[in-house]
Image (cartoon, rainbow, N blue to C red):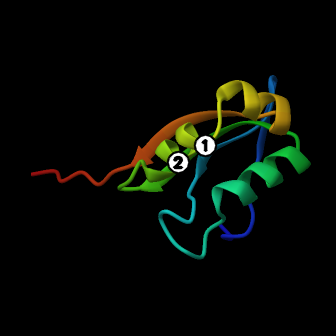
Amino acid sequence: MDVKTLNTQTNTTGNMDLRICTSHSNPKHLTIEEILEHAKANKIGLISLMDHETLAACFEVREKYSSEFLERTYGVRIIPGAQVRALVR
C-alpha cells in the first residue's frame, strides 16, 4: 500500500478502510489529521486504525476527539485496533 493513500473498499453501507497504519507505526505514513481529512474528502465513513505493535493512535484520537465530533465534522467512525506479532511454537 502506498503510504500516502488509503485502501478504500465499498460495501453496502458505504466506503470503509479497516486497516490504516498511521505515523505512529512509521513516520512516512499519514498523521491522524491527514487520515481524517482524506476520509472526509473521499466519503469514507468507517476506518480502523491498525498500527504495528501500538495503540498510540487510538489513544490519541480518544484524547483529542469525541465520537460525536468525528461523525459531525468528518463523517467517520473509528474502530480501534492494532497489528501484533505472534510466535507459533
Q: Position of residue 56 (x, y in %)?
A: 44, 52
Q: Are marks 2 and 1 in contact (CB under 8 Å)?
A: yes
Type of residue at label 2? Glu
Q: Position of residue 1 (x, y in %)?
A: 64, 66
Q: Which residue sits at x=47%, y=55%?
A: 51
Residue for badge 2? 60
Between 9 and 80, which is closer to the camera in this rendering? 80
Regarding mark 2 in the picture, which secondary structure is present there? helix
Is residue 3 shown left or right of residue 73?
A: left
Type of residue at label 1? Lys
Is residue 57 shown left or right of residue 73?
A: left
Regarding mark 1 in the picture, which secondary structure is present there? helix
Crowd class of label 1 (few under 14; some 14 to 19; many from 20; radius 10 Å): few
Residue 25 in the image: above or below residue 57: below
Crowd class of label 2 (few under 14; some 14 to 19; many from 20; radius 10 Å): few
Q: Position of residue 79 (x, y in %)?
A: 57, 33
Residue 35 in the image: above or below residue 63: below
Residue, far bottom: 28
Is residue 86 shown left or right of residue 77?
A: left
How far is the residue under mark 2 from the one under mark 1?
6 Å
Q: Quadrant of residue 78 in the image?
A: top right
User: Any mark on residue 31, and which?
Assistant: none
Between 39 and 61, which is closer to the camera in this rendering? 61
Residue, far front: 64
Q: Position of residue 24 (x, y in %)?
A: 49, 63
Q: Which residue sits at x=78%, y=29%?
A: 71
Residue for badge 1? 64
Q: Which residue sits at x=57%, y=60%?
A: 22
Q: Quadrant of residue 10 in the image?
A: top right
